[in-house]
Amino acid sequence: MAAAAAAAPGALGTLQAGRARLVAACCARLGPGWRLPGSVTGPRVAPAVWARGWTPAAGGGSAPRRGYSSEVKTEDELRVRYLEEENRGIVVLGINRAYAKNTFSKSLVKMLSKAVDALKSDKKVRTIIVRSEVPGIFCAGADLKERVKMNPSEVGPFVSKIRAVIDEIGGTQRLPRAIGMSLAKELIFSARVLDGQEAKAVGLISHVLEQNQEGDAAYRKALDLAREFLPQGPVAVRVAKLAINQGMEVDLVTGLAIEEACYAQTIPTKDRLEGLLAFKEKRPPRYKGE
């Protein structure tokens, strides 16, 4: 998805500054690995949009939820919703640990891992929105109350599990690449909390929004972004994101070679021919990801 390719890791995030909310997005790695010439490998990818928003309970004056087809209720702490109608292909992961400020517990990490693994193999999924369903909070990090009760032997594997899950949808190592090493060190060493305007100024996020009456301005913006991704060719977006993710780790010459190898992946596809035919016939393309 060409539009998704523009959302580099760490380029978007969600914070709150007074009445302002930010829309967040970062790259999600989904699906089996892709092999490029020269032993360059990478995962099949789809965009993930992080939205720090929430949906009030029904009957509380909130706007009706539209386009929801089902809700997977393994536990209420993580709500998985598949949107339909014009939003078909978008999946919403809603974090709902209000009593713990959406911190990562063992159970939440396990549920997130299970959900992401399931979405990897679902070819109908085009975009994932990760959002908070708790007012005023996105995620406060690890559940330290649970952590203090762990044996030392449990801490390492648990942290590794969190890292693995987060790496599927954007890892902490991307901060220096997004805003530069010097500023990343300053923020990490000081544990400074940025407001929305500051985060946008340093390039940490891309959008700052005024909150709406429903309290879900960030989610609405994230949904708008996801809708922009949907019409794009899945194969083209997949390799574009692969080129970006792999290219940012190497020098320019190698990056250009990766770009060329990624484009070569699209040449034998039906989607490429459909795009050319649609252009010739002056109609919207009907991509199938093949």
Image: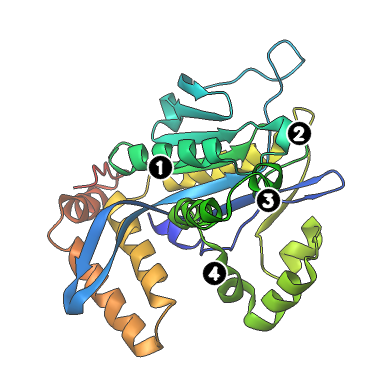
Q: Which residue is mark 3?
A: 14
Q: Quadrant of residue 268?
A: bottom left
**Mark found first going from the N terminus, 3 or 4:** 3
Q: Where in the figure is residue 244, as x and y percent of width and height?
A: 41, 70
**Mark found first going from the N terminus, 3 or 2:** 3
Q: Which residue is mark 4?
A: 173
**Mark found first going from the N terminus, 1 or 4:** 1
In the image, farthest residue toward the left: 268
**Mark found first going from the N terminus, 3 or 1:** 3
Between disc 2 and disc 1, the foreground one is: 1
Whole-angstrom CA distance, mark 3 to mark 2, is 13 Å
Between disc 2 and disc 4, the foreground one is: 4
Identify which residue is drawn at 58% across, 47% down.
50
Q: Which residue is mark 2?
A: 135
Q: Are marks 1 and 4 in contact (CB under 8 Å)?
A: no
Whole-angstrom CA distance, mark 3 to mark 4, is 18 Å
Q: Amino acid at mark 2?
A: Pro
Q: Residues within 10 Å of mark 1 (few under 14, many from 20)?
A: many
Between disc 3 and disc 4, the foreground one is: 4
In the image, farthest residue toward the top: 59
Q: Where in the figure is residue 124, as x and y percent of width and height?
A: 31, 36
Q: Amino acid at mark 1?
A: Val
In the image, farthest residue toward the right: 18
State the residue in front, 109 or 173: 109
State the residue in front, 231 or 186: 186
Whole-angstrom CA distance, mark 2 to mark 4, is 28 Å
Q: Amino acid at mark 3?
A: Thr
The image's mark for residue 116 is 1
